[in-house]
Amino acid sequence: LKSYSYGIRWMAPSTYVGGTGTSGYVPRWTGSSTLGNSAIRSTVTNVSIGTTPSSSYGLYVYPSSGITPIRAIGTNYADGIYISSNCPSTGYATVYAVQSNSSGMAGKFYGDVYIGGTLSKSSGSFLIDHPDDPLNKTLRHNFVESPENLCLYRGLVKIDQNGKGTFKLPDYFKSLTKEDEATVTLTAVGVPFDLGYEWNASFTEVTVYGEPGRKASYIVMADRDDPVMKKLYHPVVEEKSEKSICKKGVLLDPEAYGYAEEYGANYQKEKEMREREEQENTKQREQTPQIFFDEEGSAIPAQLVDEYRQAGYPLYTAREIEEKRIERYRRKLESFKKHKRIEEIKEK
């Protein structure tokens, strides 16, 4: 477009953009001036890569086998991935990860992990390289479980010539725990002897009574009672319901109790999602007519497709047109290579 003193003059571009595509696909450059289908498809509200968009997911990624679906890297003090949702109950999750292979893992984290809430699990342990044979073995120790949220403090106390010894608890002990319910376990070091203990008025120090000059080990256990624990507390036994981790009649681990996998909470969730996706795909197939092309790659109007088919006119899908285009360019390349070899032979 150029401006002249007498008005505006239109100038045709030297290169036109062409190509074929399918409705719903995001186009990509297949050549310097041609467009075709990319792996990305979209509706008004949903996007997919490698599969059909689903109204269940804002972004649905289903890559080829052996390809990592998503990689995110945060730089300059930015989060790698930020996910937020407004889940209506504990039956839903901001991140829902499923490992269908029993030998695999649903998640791996290399680095520190912070959870600003309650961590619920079926089992737990630490797993490290074995200190005595780190190249060939691992070492696992399992967590100690309790219906209480116990804090544990331990140490040694020496009893003086008056038959008394003292040890102190951290300054925050009273604020953190139910201090008046705390228990103290004393064990004599060496030959057994009688032991007893007494708290001071502020529950910050313990006096141990026993045989003068001897030592004793101690363990103090107390249930947490701080504001965060009061906020996040869960009962030890809960009735299953629509608002809990799973409904009545559904199991967290059905195989452990001899039930079929259909009773599992994860199975129910996956089944609902598969059924919803199939309904959406069927609906989309019914609502989206297939586009056909002639040999030159021009789209045939939908209302004329049946007439073309009845007349025996050759019709091609977008994939077939793309395959024909690739084959045409492959033949051109082979012809070029053959011509080049002939020229090289002539020069010799």
Image: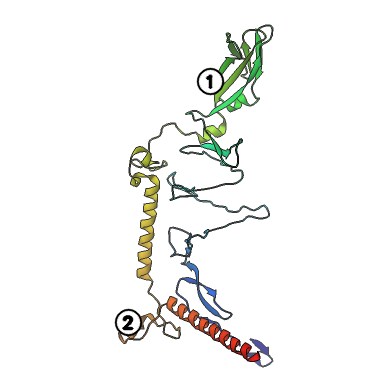
Whether residue 175 is situated above or below residue 303 in the rendered picture: above
Q: Disc 1 on helix, strand or loop?
A: helix
- Residue 302 in the image, given as x and y percentages of width and height: 37, 80
In-image side of 345 versus 24 (left or right): right
The answer to whether any part of residue 324 appears in the image is: yes
Mark toward the start of the polypeptide (2 vs 1): 1
Q: Quadrant of the N terminus?
A: bottom right
Which quarter of the figure has residue 299?
bottom left
Q: Which mark is residue 306?
A: 2
- Residue 167 in the image, given as x and y percentages of width and height: 65, 18
The kind of residue tagged 1 is Glu
Q: Residue furthest left?
A: 310
Q: Residue furthest front?
A: 348
Pointer 1 residue = 181
Name the residue: 60% across, 42% down.
135
- Residue 303 in the image, given as x and y percentages of width and height: 35, 81
Disc 2/disc 1 C-alpha distance (Å)? 83 Å
Name the residue: 68% across, 54% down.
76
- Residue 310 in the image, given as x and y percentages of width and height: 30, 84
Are there few (<14), some (14-19), or many (20+) residues within 10 Å of tag 1? few
